[in-house]
Image: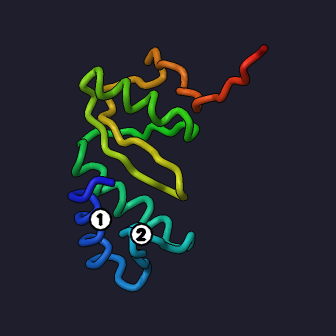
């Protein structure tokens, strides 16, 4: 999680959504579905715009996270990590086209092979 963006988010929430959210020990923000328009759409989008004036979110199955981040690091694509509902998402500038990227397939976990005699 990006500490600078998280601090900006907490400051905006404190001033614009007082009493409509909680923050857990890991500094993850929790809020009601009823406050989605204010917090999820207005406040969080303002924080994203502070990172990249024109942005998009890249979402993927959990096992693809390494493939996406490896590709972006290798190709100097700036990104910020964001977690929503326990799922990692990546905030990137809008000018990039992630659906056209040639990603390496996810790395499979190490498999133990049984010796054959």
Q: Residue at x 36, y 59 (%)?
A: 44
**Residue reaching furthest bottom?**
19
Front-most of residues 95 and 67: 67
The label number, if any, that marks residue 9 in the structure image = 1
Q: Residues within 10 Å of mark 1 (few under 14, many from 20)?
A: some
Position in image of residue 86 (x %, y %): 53, 56
In front of the other: 54 or 65:
65
Label number found at residue 26: none
SS at mark 1?
A: helix
Q: Are marks 2 and 1 in contact (CB under 8 Å)?
A: yes
Where is mark 2, residue-wise? 29
Q: Residue at x 28, y 53 (%)?
A: 2
Q: Is residue 21 above or below residue 78?
A: below
Q: Residue at x 24, y 66 (%)?
A: 7
* Image quarter hosting the C terminus: top right
| 30 lies left or right of 61 | left
């Amino acid at each position: 999680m990006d500490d600078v963006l998280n601090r900006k988010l907490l400051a905006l929430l404190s001033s614009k959504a007082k009493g409509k959210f909680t923050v857990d020990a890991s500094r993850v923000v929790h809020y009601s579905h009823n406050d989605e328009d204010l917090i999820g759409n207005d406040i969080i989008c303002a924080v994203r715009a502070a990172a990249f004036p024109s942005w998009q979110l890249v979402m993927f199955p959990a096992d693809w996270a390494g493939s996406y981040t490896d590709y972006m690091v290798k190709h100097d694509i700036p990104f910020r990590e964001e977690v929503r509902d326990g799922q990692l998402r990546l905030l990137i500038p809008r000018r990039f086209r992630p659906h056209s990227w040639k990603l390496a397939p996810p790395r499979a976990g190490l498999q133990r092979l049984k010796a054959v005699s």
